Amino acid sequence: MSDEIVQIETPFQFNEENKQEFDELIGRYPVKEAAMLPTLHLAQRQEGYITPAVMRYVAELLEVTVMKVKDVVTFYPMFFEEPVGKYVIRVCHTLPCALRDCKVVLEHLKTKLGTDIASETNLAKGTTDDGKFTLMKVECLASCDVAPVIMVNDDLYKNLTPEKVDEILEQLPN
Amino acid sequence: MVQEKRILYEHLDVPNINTFDVFRQHEGYTRFEKAIAEFQPEELAQMVWDAGLKGRGGAGFSTGEKWSFVPRDIEPRYLCCNADESEPGTFSNRYVLEKNPHLLIEGILICCYAMGIETTYVYIRGEFTLGKKMLDAAIKEAYEQGYLGENVRDTGLNINIYSHPGAGAYICGEETGLIESLEGKRGQPRNKPPFPAVQGVFMKPTVVQNVETLCNLPFIVGNGVEWYTQMGRTYGDTRFDPPKADPNTGTKLYCISGDVNEPGVYELELGLTCTELIEVAGGLRGEEVKAVIPGGSSAPILTHYELDTRLDFTSLTLAKSMLGSGGIIVMNETRNIVDCLLNIMKFYAHESCGQCTPCRWGTPWVRDIVQRIADGEGRQTTITRPKFGVTESGRWGDTGETEEIYEDLDLLENVANNIANVDTMTWNTICVFGIAVSWPAVSYLRKFRPEFEAAIRDSKLVTLSVAEATVPPEENYAYQQRFIPKEFAEIQETTED
Ligand SMILES: Cc1cc2nc3c(=O)[nH]c(=O)nc-3n(C[C@H](O)[C@H](O)[C@H](O)COP(=O)(O)O)c2cc1C
Ligand code: SF4
Ligand code: FES
């Protein structure tokens, strides 16, 4: 018995505010399932990532199978199935940004944060040990005129140089 | 020099244009009011057709024609506004959403009135957090002012707009992928037909329209068809007898990025040349243009011989490329085409939705071949075919001569063409993502073959000079076959004589 691994799962439920937002959301669509993406976004904002409990909860809310929720979560790169850092740094590396030296920015971030780049199946690889940052590469962020760009959580930063990256990292609250 | 012609972007930089009051001061919603007061829905749809508005999202399909496919007797009908903007090199919708969201709402209102639609979903890509915030705020204001909701401005119309966030998948920009995603599923495109106009979201008739397309509507209604068709040019399609008008009218929000001095969005009349656009964007950064991608990364590349091609739907199609989303990416002489192709192929390999086997396996395969070439491990083989001639011993027989071939280059073209064949324009996939993969792969290879060969020969990436890297026009398949369209008025004159 002793070597059996028991995974204790934290239960999940929307908080008051999100519950209200969800109730408003669900009225927008003729079928409940259509509220899937906005609901998952809400849940991820509250919980940080999509846990099995979240999936079960969302499935119940939208009256679909858990498998269907899982199906969706695995398809979209913006949903995380593992914990991520407090700040998710997305570095654009598609052609227009590449033509403007996004590699320099990426390398600088790697050395500065002391971490590798996360892959979609291994987010831990790109997360700093203190759990503050997750570094990942993304495709074109539709801001190629101000390349190279990065997104830190919801905010876009433009025309980056290593110095600007330092400034941005410094002014982030702990 | 060509002048900017700001119509959609005219008030973009007015402070607080995102608020209802300021927008109202700049003719906001007057065009919607005019539409309701002066036109019947069917008349409006005809106007849009007559104006020659073509979809700005990628396919360039006539908007009026698309609307005519929507059965008006099936209720409810939906409008999906495509704000998924994820084609590399495109960034014009973003500014509309972030700075002037009321313009989009006005466009949506006009479309809803013309098509008898009550519900609109604006599918915004997940990364546009600011854009979604601004649009949501504008929608809220419009509800408060009575331009949305039940019985809009006492006209008896009910119109609702909802924003719907995506979650980072490029393929959700494809119209049926968008619809699937909106229904809460994986964004995997559907087989067509049935087209969304007949069976779209929730299996009801659906109009899918890009942000920029919808933003054109207020100006067509406000200033009339005559005014609109004076911008851009109308070509004559001589495949028809008598020649049919092929409009490329209005302005386009050209997004220009890469090696130019002032990248950005420039609103210009459709139909200026590549050279002119580079000039408008502050000129080239560097010495020489090596290549230009004219319509987002999916479009076939243009070489420096082809810079006089007009950037409009018809001219680019006839030059075997496309205007697509209007994302122009410029590369100067220091760029390595193999490296650029590798970057783009990584993008496509990442974004394939995985439904069709040729796309799911072919795209990473193409990427791997290009990666191999870029790593200096491109395969080259010596093949021996029996070749008859006088042998060393003076007799007639097999001379044992060999031939060097670049195996990987043939393989690359073969694999790409089996996802979608760019010569016959047939694809073995559900959606045209397949073409979006093989178009760049094949066109880069055919037009810049010397650079690919050099990378294999020297076992490393070699950046050749522009003249050396480019296939000369006599051997450039696209340049050889390109056809310069004639203006409609000109054709009519000659036939009348
Ligand atoms: C792979 C792929 C990606 C696309 N991405 C977008 C996009 O991001 N935004 C867009 O407006 N249209 C995109 N389209 C084009 C849409 O399928 C559709 O043609 C367009 O939204 C129709 O609107 P329009 O007629 O106003 O252009 C894409 C098409 C394909 C095949
Ligand atoms: S072509 Fe590719 S992206 Fe399109 S449906 Fe098939 S697998 Fe998906
Ligand atoms: S390529 Fe980086 S924003 Fe478009």
Image: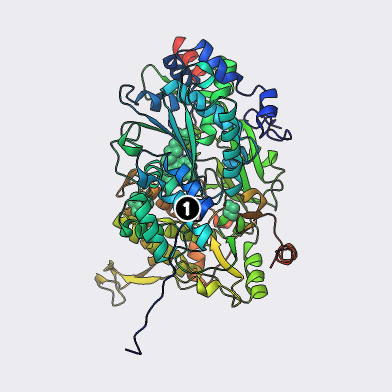
Residue B465 percent across, percent down from the top left:
61, 58
Q: How is the image coloured?
A: rainbow
Q: Identify the residue at the far bottom of this view.
A: A2
Number of numbered tags placed on the structure image: 1
Name which quarter of the figure residue B272 lies in: top right
Residue at x 61%, y 50% (from the top left corner):
A144
Does residue A23 lie above or below A65 as drawn?
above
Does residue B31 lie above or below B417 as drawn?
above
Residue A149 percent across, percent down from the top left:
64, 56
Residue nearer the viewer, B302 or A27: A27
Residue at x 28%, y 77% (from the top left corner):
B393
Residue B371 percent across, percent down from the top left:
47, 67
Residue B69 percent across, percent down from the top left:
34, 26
> On the picture, is B9 further left or further right than A46?
right
Q: Say what secondary structure mark 1 lies in.
A: loop
Which chain is home to disc 1?
B
| The C terminus of chain A lies in quadrant | bottom right
Residue B60 visible in the picture: no
Does residue A114 lie above or below B231 as drawn?
below
> On the picture, is B412 further left or further right than B463?
left
Residue B408 visible in the picture: yes
Residue at x 29%, y 49% (from the top left corner):
B428
Mark 1 belongs to which amino acid? Ala
Residue nearer the viewer, B144 or B131: B144
| The N terminus of chain A lies in quadrant | bottom left
Circle 1 residues within 10 Å: few <14, some 14–19, many ≥20: many
* Disc 1: which residue: B167
Residue nearer the viewer, B475 or B168: B168
Asked if the beta carbon under badge 1 is closer than 8 A to the nearest atom of ligand 1, the reply is no
